[in-house]
Image (spheres, helix red, strand yellow):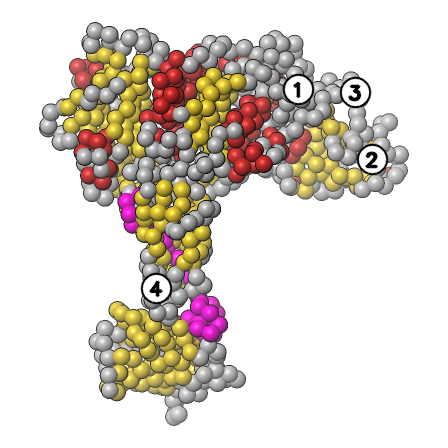
Amino acid sequence: MAVPSISPGTTGSPVYTVHHSKGLVADLSLDVGISPPFPAFELRFPDTGDVVVSLVRAFKALPLLPGPVDDTTTFAKRRIVSEASPAGTDIVLTVEIQATSAATPGEKWSLRVQSGTEQPLWQFSQAENTPSTPTITRIMCDPAAGFTISAPALADGTVREGIPVTLTAVPPFGTAADPTVVGAPKPSVAHKWSTTGGLAIPAFPACSPSPLLVFTSPPVYAARSVDITEDVWFETGCPGPAGILNNTSPSQQLTIENRPQHLAVVLDRSGSMSGDRWTQAKTATQVLGNLFTAMRAGVNSADRIELLVFEDGSCTWHTVADPLIQPVLAATDLGSADVAICSVNFGDAGSCTPIGDGLIRAIDDLGALPTQGDPKYTIVLLTDGYENSGSVRVSPNSPLPAGASGIPLFGVARQSGAVRQRVHQHLSLFTIGLGATVQEDVLDTLATQSQGVYRHVDDPADIADALTQVVKYALGVERVKLEPPEQLPPPEQLWREVCLEPGVNRLAVAVMWEDPNDTLELSWQQEQDSGWTTVAAAVKQCETHGFVSVDVASLFGGDEDSVPATRWRVAHLDSAGVPLPLVTNEPLFFIDLFVRVDVVFDREVYSTGDAMTMTARIRAGDEPVTRATVRVELARPGMSLGTFLSTHGAEYRPPQQDTTDPHAPKALMLAYLLGQAEMPDGLPVTGPQSIFEDGSDELFDDGEHGDGEAGNGNFTNRYTDLDKEGTYTWRFVIEGETPDGAPFSRVVTLSKWVGVAPDPESSSVTVEEGDFTRIVVWPRDHRGEFLGPFRPQDVIFTSSHCPFLPGSDEGDPNGVRYPCNDGGTILSRYDGGYSRDIDRTPGTPNTVTITVKGFTFPPVVMGERNEGTEP
């Protein structure tokens, strides 16, 4: 492919030649007078008949072809005279600009030239142009187009699924020897990336000024290829139409092949999980195991799944993990797992909560598996509480008892040694928090820092939905929205139906039940009025649920590209074959990814006062889906966690508690204060009707909601009411049509933790003098919401001269004392304050600086004039 270029590549030349471009733009600075000689310029180009030339000044344009032109009306007080003459196989266009009055030096003009096809040669001349007196300030042609593909273990254009792939565009401005822009300023650049090949990769199409695009290679059952193309243009940017100077790269083929998937489900078996929580957690884990074996069956023989439980019988912090942390289903191949999952003995919920130990054991078990084929590691963690024991901490804010040492942080332990480091580099960690007293901020951080997502669940009955939805990002599985049962007459409420779009390869259904002798029946039809065909599929009859899966592609010759739109129904039958109602126990329908919905947020971490922009990228194969409605439901905190603890904590003193699975200090305080406030279900949660800043509850693909170019399949809106600390859980209900008119539906639910952004002006600081100097800070945001207790890692004190004191070994009734690296301690007070004590003689100058979550407060300057006062 010939590369566009301009010669010479320096300013000041009276003649420029443009090679292999569809057009050019010449920006001019001309002294326009009312008497000769008048400024003139010349354009020579091949006589193709499709060239468009315009003279532009101050947003007005005058077409110069066909000519001749003698125009005195387009530009005020200016006459334009131009003529096009044949010169062999070329056309020579001459243009002269005259002032009818008001002569002006250095007037800005632009000649804009465009052809429908690339031309080997253009020539632009302006005789007065010199380096010292430039009349051609800038000349541009089509940008250079092309890109490189890079990825870990990329070989012969092939990558494995689940791998970050980077596309890097060649410099659009060309090289010093062969530039595409001569002069200044450099124009804005837009890069638009697209694919063909039938694979849903939500990152495409994409348009931005960045020359880089990073995407994750999608899940595949067998090797699939896509062709990638870059379009690049100058001036108009994204979103918007391509500028007149544009170029398209040659396409490059990228082949994606499957790789081993190693999955570990890490299940909290502590005492607080007992009862309905434990029953639902076991059921959900089995459903997830069934889903994994169904969707990955026959894909890669090296796939493995492990089910792991964790608890700690000693209920203390110690240096060796409790042997109770064991797999209840050791990492095994999918054929064996398929047989064993329904009969797994999970044991009984019992003792304490060593979250870090459970995760490290899963990492070690995954690391012990064979490494051939570059396996992808996935961990799904389910817990209902705060860590309170173990040999590894997931949070630096988890207090340790006096004398405890040698307890590393999970972020360090997960990377210790070559084996853990390998797993760490290829790990996606998904977290689910259950209930009102769960370490939500930590679970959100664990997920977002490990290529995963977080989900909060209030009702144990929703655990199965949560487990199976978060893992969609690892397995390539979507949850399908069912048709509402109330729209069916009573006889038809004995089954539930879904419409599936073309291209679906596999389908799986789970139905909760109470009798393992029950069974499920799946039927399908291709046309609405045709009869139903029952599928002879084996049903897994687990104790608490039934599970059935179908290879849909096999019904149509085994080729997923030939699968048409279909309609499916599931019936729940008792042991005698009699249908049972399916109104309250809603089935879970899952399909693989032809239509893919990928929900992304504009950042990983949010604080109060931020705006949150979310986008649902919807693709059907390699085509963006534009005919869809994305409705959003929000469950958001009605009260900030830190504010609730701080405002109720001034008189709080830790009560005695059961030692079977004692609460961690923060969880104990929260549980106790909730009880005192008669709030057994936790802090209030609200569900606003008008969610987004435009007053709607929808995401839009209209080019007016930060979604980029209208009709690109990206549905976006912005939420501006992040005013409370806590978890914001978003439920996206998507219904629409694929580009070929087939209906589809999806449900996606995700959670995001929002912390407090401290505001020094809204916070308070006091200095107390006695036998020592005590400085106390109460961090709050600009609305007055408290950071709250038990976040000592967020609060940093530094002293200019005097040392900090360690505090009493007997503890402090007003809060929990944490050791600091400088030898002193920080007291996290129950009323939301943080204090440090300084060994300082009265009158001794000293300056203390306080930084909270990166926000630096005004320095506390201590001297004789402000002893014992609030700065």
Q: In the image, is residue 165 above or below residue 546?
A: below
Mark 1 or 2, closer to the camera: 1
State the residue position of label 2.
Answer: 803
| The disc label shown at residue 317, or none | 1
Q: Residue 345 falls in which quadrant of the image?
A: top left
Location of residue 418 in the rendering, given as x and y in whole percent from the top left corner: 58, 36
Of callouts 2 and 4, the N-terminal one: 4
The reply to whether dot 2 and dot 4 touch (C-beta < 8 Å) is no
The kind of residue on which mark 3 rests is Asp
Q: Residues within 10 Å of mark 3 (few under 14, many from 20)?
A: few
Of callouts 3 and 1, the N-terminal one: 1
The reply to whether dot 3 and dot 1 touch (C-beta < 8 Å) is no
Mark 4 or 1, closer to the camera: 1
- The residues tagged by marks 1 and 2 sit, at their Cα atoms, a distance apart of 29 Å
Q: Which residues are magenta?
A: 173-199
| The disc label shown at residue 483, or none | none
| The disc label shown at residue 247, or none | 4
Relative side of 460 to 786, left or right = left
Query: Which residue is found at the position 39% from the left and 13% from the top?
Result: 343
- The residues tagged by marks 4 and 1 sit, at their Cα atoms, a distance apart of 62 Å
The kind of residue on which mark 1 rests is Trp
Q: In the image, is residue 48 above or below residue 39?
A: above
